[in-house]
């Protein structure tokens, strides 16, 4: 688009000035530095305006999903691409929220939905490179049932440590270990070091129990984020700038799933995946997390096998 970089520069300058004016209030009341969030947003805008960056993103995604029969990443024609032009393989598929279109194409909707969540979990917890804008217009169902992604201008990364702690957090939710979940939030940067887990754990337990309803199938991530936004006024929670993109991506993915199947629960797929990661990961940190979940201390301080 002609003049795009000049427009982005002016818009981001104005946006940054406004963020600085509100930053002190934001840190005191919301526990987050909104200038960092604006900076993250601005960095993504600059990346999206450079098609050479997007071409490399597509190449990295293709390498990550190489050999995965459930995911399609388009090929890039590097010889016909530049900073201002990108040329890639055409994706022929059905929009991911077009339920009627999927049925006409003979696509198994439940399998497609599950494959989509598995692909999202692999991005977040295995690769650490995830699609930051997986709305329905960027995700397609192909005739053979594969999930196809397009528009890789907005991607983000998570460190190995962050991914490991997220896996632990999912497992702690499944086991209702809310004090350990508070510790996970500290390690991820949502809470400042030194907070007392015993003070925050009951409030977190209420949120998760309400979100799960009568069974795990009732879990709704959108409900969780809504409740946590209120919890930020009671406890020193903050949202690390990178995780604002994670939340956005997960909410979009869940929205697609619920559009196709209102009874779908993303946690039903996430818990088995997290368990598999804990069991198969040789990292010492993950080994300790697994042992802490499997074994509990009794009243005498001895480690005993947890059978429930």
Image (cartoon, rainbow, N blue to C red):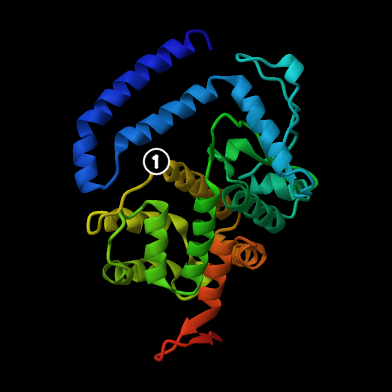
Of residues 59 and 259, the one drawn nearer to the viewer in this rendering: 59
In the rendered image, the residue lying farthest to the top is: 2
Q: Residue at the spot x=60%, y=60% of the render? A: 283
Count the marks: how many?
1
Q: Is residue 41 left or right of residue 294?
A: left
Looking at the image, residue 263 lies above or below residue 117: below
Looking at the image, residue 252 lies above or below residue 291: above
Q: Residue at the spot x=44%, y=42% of the render? A: 242
The quadrant holding residue 108 is bottom right
Residue 263 visible to the viewer: no
Q: Residue at the spot x=47%, y=8% of the render? A: 3
Task: Give x and y (percent) for residue 99.
Answer: 65, 49
Q: Is residue 85 left or right of residue 154?
A: right
Looking at the image, residue 107 lies above or below residue 33: below
Looking at the image, residue 169 lies above or below residue 45: below
- Give the class, few, some or many, for how many residues have Cα within 10 Å of label 1's Cα (few <14, many ≥20): some
The quadrant holding residue 93 is top right
Callout 1 secondary element: helix
Residue 128 visible to the viewer: yes
Q: Is residue 193 left or right of residue 51?
A: left
Q: Residue at the spot x=30%, y=20% of the render? A: 14
The quadrant holding residue 76 is top right
The residue that label 1 is drawn on is: 241
Of residues 152 and 284, the one drawn nearer to the viewer in this rendering: 284
Task: Give x and y (percent) for residue 271.
Answer: 57, 66
Task: Give x and y (percent) for residue 210.
Answer: 38, 69
Of residues 229 and 160, the one drawn nearer to the viewer in this rendering: 160
Task: Give x and y (percent) for residue 222.
Answer: 43, 54
């Amino acid at each position: 688009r002609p003049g795009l970089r000049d427009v982005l520069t002016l818009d981001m300058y104005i946006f940054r000035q406004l963020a600085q004016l509100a930053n002190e209030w934001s840190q005191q009341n919301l526990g987050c530095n909104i200038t960092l969030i604006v900076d993250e947003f601005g960095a993504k805008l600059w990346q999206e305006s450079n098609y050479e960056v997007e071409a490399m993103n597509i190449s990295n995604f293709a390498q990550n999903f190489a050999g995965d029969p459930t995911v399609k990443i388009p090929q890039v024609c590097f010889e016909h691409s530049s900073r201002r032009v990108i040329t890639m393989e055409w994706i022929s598929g059905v929009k991911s929220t077009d339920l009627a279109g999927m049925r006409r194409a003979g696509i198994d909707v439940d399998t497609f939905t599950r494959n989509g969540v598995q692909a999202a979990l692999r991005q977040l917890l295995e690769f650490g490179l995830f699609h930051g804008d997986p709305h329905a217009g960027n995700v397609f169902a192909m005739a053979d049932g594969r999930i196809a992604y397009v528009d890789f201008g907005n991607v983000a990364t998570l460190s190995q440590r962050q991914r490991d702690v997220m896996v632990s957090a999912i497992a702690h939710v499944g086991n209702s270990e809310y004090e350990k979940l508070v510790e996970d939030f500290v390690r991820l940067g949502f809470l400042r070091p030194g907070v007392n887990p015993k003070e925050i754990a009951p409030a977190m337990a209420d949120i998760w129990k309400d979100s799960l309803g009568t069974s795990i199938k009732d879990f709704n991530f959108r409900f969780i984020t809504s409740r946590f936004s209120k919890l930020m006024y009671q406890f020193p929670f903050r949202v690390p700038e990178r995780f604002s993109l994670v939340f956005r991506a997960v909410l979009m993915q869940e929205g697609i799933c619920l559009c196709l199947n209102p009874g779908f629960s993303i946690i039903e797929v996430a818990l088995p995946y997290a368990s598999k990661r804990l069991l198969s990961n040789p990292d010492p940190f993950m080994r300790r997390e697994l042992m802490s979940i499997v074994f509990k201390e009794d009243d005498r301080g001895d480690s005993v096998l947890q059978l429930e």
